Image (cartoon, rainbow, N blue to C red):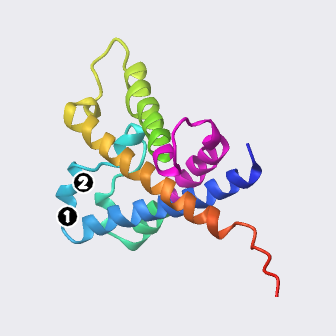
Amino acid sequence: MASKDIGNGAIAGIITGVIMGVLSILMALIGLASLLAFVDVRSVFGGMLPAVGFAAASLTAMITLLLFMAIIGLILGAIFGAIIESIPTGNNVTKGIVFLLAIWVIFGLLIPIILKAGGTLPTSLTTTGIVTALVAAIIWGGLLGVVFDWVSKKAGVPSMVKA
């Protein structure tokens, strides 16, 4: 675990979180809110993120959502950077997808089931909810891997060119 990877992951996570937040807000603003039924970012985390629909209502709500997504991205990215070498796949994009799928399983499936043990299942654990959260986790993870690659190349040591 290199501290450079943690820093690169944190930066990549912030960028990815903001991109996902902007995409969610844009879909709501331009009338594609119906697509949110197919790509529900909130359900990746068991509904713990704020709803996107309200974010289109005011500038304050949009900024709040973007800040919240940046903070979530920072945390996820730093964890991703810390464990990136341990994820058994070939490139960073697939590592990001595997990482976010693991996050989705923990926060989107296991914790809601454990918290509702003995009671009824949460409404987010329907077939549609599971599939939409899966799609959102794949998109977020792939984007995290791409941005991590980009940040790692930008933050790399400049090569020495002899004149």
Mark linked to residue 65: none
From the viewer's perspective, is 25 left or right of 30?
A: right
Q: Is residue 10 magenta?
A: no
Question: For the view shown, which residue lies furthest in the top direction?
Answer: 118
Residue placed under numbered mark 1 in the picture? 32
- In the rendered image, residue 88 lying in the magenta stretch gets the answer yes
Residue 136 location, x and y as percent? Answer: 34, 48
Q: Quadrant of residue 118?
A: top left
Contact between labelled residues 2 and 1, with CB atoms less than 8 Å apart: yes
**Residue beneath disc 2:** 36
Q: Residue furthest right?
A: 162
Q: Nearer the viewer, residue 92 or 143?
A: 92
Question: Where's residue 53, x and y in %?
Answer: 28, 59
Region of the chain picked out in magenta, as a range:
67-95
Residue drawn 24% across the image and 54% down it: 36
Among the 4 quarters of the image, the one containing residue 62: bottom left
Return the x and y of residue 139 as percentages of the image width and height.
Answer: 37, 52
Q: In the figure, residue 19 lies in which quadrant?
A: bottom left
| Viewer-side residue, 91 vs 76 | 91
Identify the residue shown where x is 64% and y is 41%.
Answer: 85
> Is residue 35 placed above or below 60 in the rendered structure?
above
Element marked by disc 2: helix
